Amino acid sequence: MRKSLPVSALVVLSVAALGACGDDDSGSSATTKAAATTVATSAAPTTAAATAAASTTAAATTVAPKPGPPIKIGAVLSVTGPGSSLGAQQKNTLEMLTEQLNAAGGFKGRKVELKVADDQSNPDRAVEQTRALIQEFKPTAIVGASLSGSCLATKPVTQEAGVLQYCLSAANIPTPAPLYFSAQSPLGAWIGNLPFEYFKEKGFKKIGCLASDDASGQLTVGVLKPAAKGAGIELFTENFNIADVDVSAQLTRLRDKGLDAMYVCTSGTGVVTVLQGMKQLGINLPTWIGSGSASLPVAALIKDLLPSKGVLTGGEKIQVYEALPADDPQAKQIQAFATAYQAKFNSRPDLFAASAADAFTILLTAIEGAGEGANTAAVAKYMEDKVEYTGVQLTYNFTPEDHRGTGLSGIVVEFTDKGAFKFVKQFKTVTDYVAAGSK
Amino acid sequence: MSTFLQFLFGGLVSGAIFALIALGWVLIYNVSGVLNLAQGEFVMIGALVFVEMRSGHDLPVAVSIVGAVAITVAVAVVLDIAILRRLRNDQMVPMVLVTVGASVVLREIAQEIFGKDPLRTKPLLDGDPFSVGGATVLPHTLLLWASVVVLVALLTLFFARSLVGKAMRACHENALGAQVVGVSPQRMRTAAFALSAALGAVAGVLIVPVTSMSWNGGTALGLKGFVAATFGGLGSLPGAVVGGIAIGIIEALAAGYVSSAYKDVFATLVLLALLLARPQGLLGASQRDERVGGGLVPRLGALLRARTVGGARDGAPPQRAVKDGTSTQGENT
Amino acid sequence: MTLRLSDVHGGYGATKVLVGVSFGVEPGSVVALLGSNGAGKTSTLRAVAGLLSLTAGTVTVDGNDLARRRPCDRPADGIGHVPEGRQLFAGMTVLDNLRLGAYATRRDTQEMLGEVFALFPVLADKRRARAGSLSGGQAQMLAIGRALMCRPRYLLLDEPSLGLSPMNVDRVFETVVELARRGVGIMLAEQNASRALEIAQVGHVLDQGRVTMSGPGNELLGRPEIVESYLGGASA
């Protein structure tokens, strides 16, 4: 514990660069926030440096003035089950941040109470856990779930109970709800617009997609079809069963189409099966992998199967945090968080961890900002009107119409033969091909 | 032609693996009448232990294979001795339920030990694909085929030549007769679990470089093996091999020539059509020749008949009627 | 040196099929169990073979209680069994059936094969044939031969004459006498009462799971009222 203390100081800095303007008047911060309009400052290097000193003293100073009631945050995450590679990191992140905040005297003087429940990657279980959490723990807000299925299943429960929910998946928000927010870049943009922006830039005309017949594969196909149409690129699709041992028949069909690039429309073990088949058939094409596979475990899994033309995916800055340019506005935040996470859990944080960190901080900011006793509607209103946040994953600016509040980082990364990612390029703007093709 | 060959090779890869798993199903089913629904978990355990030993601890390939097989066999033997032996031999439904429970528990344990993410190791024979008649094959694939051929040959020898192998066949032919000559049905079932775990583990070792494996990745493969076993005629060992390869090739040809979106549907339709035409499966014993073994469907039929007629005579438990009610008829001089 | 049943009670679930059966089989003797269908003949053999659970009483072989021995231990305990319906391995060869007969003991297999083939030369000729392809008489010989492969001291025979031609019945009964002459104790359950009593030293008549009458074979055979009232159906 002792040796993690310096790290915790860093995290407090990174999580709450808010400290920069909060320390001096921690007790009555609500009015100050309102006046400042920007609650969470972007962590400009200068202010960050200033707060490095401030945050260490914060622990001492914030205990003394009248502390507000604790902020209660619940979380329903896929800690076990098929979604566990997301949920486990998210649980780690929330627990680490809570611990660091409380060790430093709380979030601007208010202790944070966290309770994490495991939905076992099962939407039914997620509903049960959400109900139980609301009844027993009475949180102001719930972070989660990790998977879109669980998010959508729990949404009616939180909305009826008047609890804020911040879903961590990239799922679409079919019908906006006043107390429901969602993390991540919009999925369609992430897995559809970005790759097609890249394909267009390269002048590709024909793309082959080998899709698994499970949810991840069919979801990807559903996005790629309109995206291809919108981008004016021809898309050829073949299917396989996620339990298939061999997909060379499907790949043979695709190969004979004279493709410019491949899109691996699946996740998890399916990616290996597809890349193995490409190797067997000698299909050496630039290859894009869907977002579900843009994670480190998958990168380690396929490091010896990469076609020499490169395997790409839509990434996030945290995946290449060491290589971020120094003038990137998020660089300090991301690096501080990633270093702390790595030190504590001895594993690299993925974008799932980053999205949980952002959700947590945004919720705390809004709850604290709306003031003691404010109801959840007021907190949501505060999020829509006042919160502008430069996070570990993305930057956020919510409106009543947009409860995702964020776009696309536009980052393209390449899988390396070391089992990691390397930065390829960042698109400043990405055309919405999915929308164009859906018309 | 080269396209057809490529489809065929693909089908033979899946088919060889399905055949190994189907053999595991049939072995246990024949000897004890138990449908072991943890069959796919044997594949998973074999694969994950192999990866852990080879890549996690840098052990030699041979040692890792032996270790993977040994540990999987140990798990199967413990499952049989510690749990199934506590049930009466004629309690089929509880036994099958126990194997369902075992599959869930084994998955959870595997998740604890090996983690949640898929694992993989390098191919046993690494190298670039080479061309056969215009189609390409990976070196590892050749090794996979060779291993399956050798295993099936060894298994055939075991059942044809060794006394233990014959005793296992005897349990299937006539459970009461086997007991009368001193074959312990419990020990034979343990032996069958061990053998089928070994086959599953080898299947796991062979596919983990190709597809990777995660704690929950065995179940679907296990079911594929069951379909293959049914296709070949549940109860027939040659049928398991033929059924596995047939399913693999049908799926590959359907994916190649018809539509990959409907290849599973296609394979299922072929299976249904076959079962309607030949309820005993491809190589299962026909009704007339039922005493040789009999597939699942005739067995269920026999069970129903035995129940409705009121069981075997002398008040013996109806289970007996299913198992040995076949050899008494038609023996007049 | 006896195979002995002492006050044996047993049944399947709630159905009691044996009610206090007691008798013994000496080595070298033939003991016939008689009675109509369902009287308990087969159940008595199954009780000795361990296939029927006892609710009371003991079965001992040469003084050793068999209560804790499993059914598949019987060959090792010196008991061969030709069960009801023969229960041969129909899909396997004659030779494999015989070899499996020695599965429990696994000694002197070649020597015993020689003895069985000497006893039933037709089995030697058919050694490569599938058991399922044998005629009824040959199948019965195979069943007896298989039971002999473990060199039993006692042999349980369940309806060996059932479904056989008269010539084959003669053949089987001659073999039984020969085996007894060699010192095997034989427990013979038979519907064909008169044939059984001709070769039996002792006969026991069973009715509803009880021994209702016992006596030397020729004595029982000489009492026509017994043959008529208890065994009438059998000679028809």
Image (spheres, grey):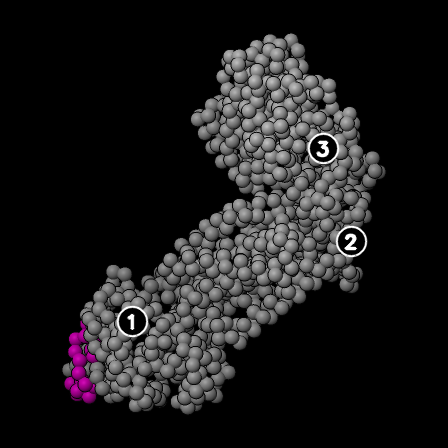
Task: Verify whether residue C223 appears in magenta.
Answer: yes
Q: Nearer the viewer, mark 3 or mark 2?
A: 3
Left or right relative to B310: residue C211 = left
Label 3 or label 2, whichever comes before in sequence order? 2
Q: CA distance from mark 2 to mark 1?
A: 69 Å
Left or right relative to A264: residue C208 = left
Q: Chain of mark 3?
A: A
Report the span colored magenta.
Answer: C204-224
Residue A253 is situated, as x and y percent measured from the top left of the image, at 74, 51
Q: Which mark is residue B222?
A: none
Residues behind callouts 1 and 3 on a single chain: no
Position of the C terminus of chain B, as image quadrant, is bottom left
Q: Amino acid at mark 3?
A: Tyr
Residue A255 is situated, as x and y percent measured from the top left of the image, at 77, 50
According to the picture, the residue beneath numbered tag 2 turns out to be A282
User: Does any portion of residue C67 appear in the rendered image?
Assistant: yes
Residues behind callouts 2 and 1 on a single chain: no
According to the picture, the residue beneath numbered tag 1 turns out to be C66
According to the picture, the residue beneath numbered tag 3 turns out to be A321
